[in-house]
Image: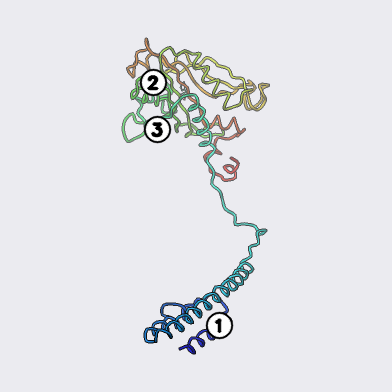
């Protein structure tokens, strides 16, 4: 038995020395040291020996186990290092090689503008109406009648509005102002919301006009709201959106659903007010329509104009984007040419 153990040690040592890979060592370990290995089978036979032999052979077997085990560990470390170095050498990465080209998607410039404007008005205490609360397929009743348009108003004419064939008096909305009605029917004052969305107008497409575009509607109704509040909010908006050095002016105007009404101009961003082609020589650019909510509109939704007053405004997203980035053709937003879109 002693001889057998010495052979195991000798053969084991030999095999360990000759091992070439970590995998070889693993097999050697199984062969000699595992529960089914050669040493274990000797240990199992110890029970047939005398006490004295049991002690001698037992401790010899332990010594053989320990020395093979430590040899394997040592060799394992060596082989591991060699294999690792080989791997590192073989898999060397050339970081100077050009990488794969990945096309990166971008947020559409109109969406960027909407997000920016929404953020500005949120900062001024407005909340945003959910788009499903103010649909693009709208009734004439909400889009016009409730907004105090007289029955034969020219804006209701077929030239401006897309009518549908599906149901009488169902249209593609021509403005987001219907959102004012929907919000007030649904919420008692105080109301302080904005509502971004698409609108449609039946007109010939040109560099300045598309028959689909975007507006952002704003509405604030509460007690003691005056035109000064409207001016304050809109001046603040223009100051944040165009920068504080850009003068504004409020020009008297007309909308059926506001009284008094105004159009807000900013000083031309191209010529700084001197007069150029963009501003048709006036030095000013119109950026939004606004006014105090008409008493008839408040009555239409059951709000008492003796108690409450409010203001509304509406702005064109395409126009605001074109002015900010000096874009000269509205159709660029809808062609989806990546050479244009990539610039934002
Ligand atoms: N709806 C108007 C337009 O499309 C803009 C507007 C909105 C004017 C709200 C006043 C108040 O031209």
Where residue 100 appears, as percent x and y from the top left, is: 60, 57
Q: Mark 2 points at which residue?
A: 147
Give the mark nearer the N terminus: 1 vs 3: 1
Give the mark nearer the N terminus: 1 vs 2: 1
Residue sitting at x 40%, y 32%: 130
Where residue 316 appears, as percent x and y from the top left, is: 51, 28
Where residue 225 appears, as percent x and y from the top left, is: 44, 14
Quarter residue 325 falls in? top right
Q: State which quarter of the image contains the C terminus.
A: top right
Answer few, some or many: residues within 10 Å of disc 1's Cα (few below 14, many 20 plus, some between 14 and 19): some
Answer few, some or many: residues within 10 Å of disc 3's Cα (few below 14, many 20 plus, some between 14 and 19): few
Answer few, some or many: residues within 10 Å of disc 2's Cα (few below 14, many 20 plus, some between 14 and 19): many
Give the mark nearer the N terminus: 3 vs 2: 3
On residue 13, which mark appears?
1
Scheme of colours in the image: rainbow
Of tags 1 and 2, which is closer to the observer?
Answer: 1
On residue 130, which mark appears?
3
Where residue 151 appears, as percent x and y from the top left, is: 36, 19
Quarter residue 15 falls in? bottom right
User: Can residue 24 be seen in this snapshot?
Assistant: no
């Amino acid at each position: 038995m002693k001889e057998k153990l010495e052979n195991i040690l000798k053969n084991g040592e030999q095999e360990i020395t000759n091992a070439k890979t970590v995998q070889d060592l693993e097999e050697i370990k199984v062969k000699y040291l595992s529960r089914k290995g050669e040493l274990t089978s000797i240990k199992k036979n110890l029970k047939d020996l005398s006490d004295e032999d049991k002690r001698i052979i037992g401790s010899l077997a332990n010594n053989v186990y320990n020395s093979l085990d430590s040899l394997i560990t040592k060799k394992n470390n060596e082989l591991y290092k060699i294999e690792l170095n080989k791997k590192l050498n073989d898999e060397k990465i050339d970081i100077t090689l050009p990488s794969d080209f990945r096309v990166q998607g971008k947020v559409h410039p109109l969406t960027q503008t909407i997000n920016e404007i929404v953020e500005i008005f949120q900062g001024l205490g407005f909340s945003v109406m959910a788009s499903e609360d103010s649909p693009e397929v709208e009734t004439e009743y909400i889009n016009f009648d409730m907004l105090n348009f007289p029955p034969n108003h020219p804006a209701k004419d077929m030239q401006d509005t897309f009518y549908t064939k599906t149901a009488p008096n169902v249209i593609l909305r021509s403005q987001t102002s219907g959102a004012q009605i929907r919000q007030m029917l649904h919420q008692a004052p105080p109301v302080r919301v904005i509502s971004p969305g698409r609108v449609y107008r039946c007109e010939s497409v040109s560099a300045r006009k598309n028959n689909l575009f975007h507006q952002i509607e704003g509405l604030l109704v509460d007690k003691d709201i005056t035109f000064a509040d409207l001016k304050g909010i809109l001046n603040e908006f223009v100051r944040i959106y165009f920068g504080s050095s850009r003068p504004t002016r409020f020009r008297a105007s007309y909308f059926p659903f506001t009284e008094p009404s105004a159009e807000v101009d900013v000083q031309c961003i191209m010529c700084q007010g001197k007069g150029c082609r963009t501003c048709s020589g006036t030095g000013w650019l119109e950026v939004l329509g606004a006014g105090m909510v008409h008493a008839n509109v408040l009555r239409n939704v059951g709000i008492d104009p003796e108690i409450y007053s409010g203001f509304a405004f509406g702005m064109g997203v395409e126009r605001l984007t074109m002015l900010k980035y000096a874009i000269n053709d509205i159709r660029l937003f809808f062609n989806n040419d990546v050479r244009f879109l990539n610039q934002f």
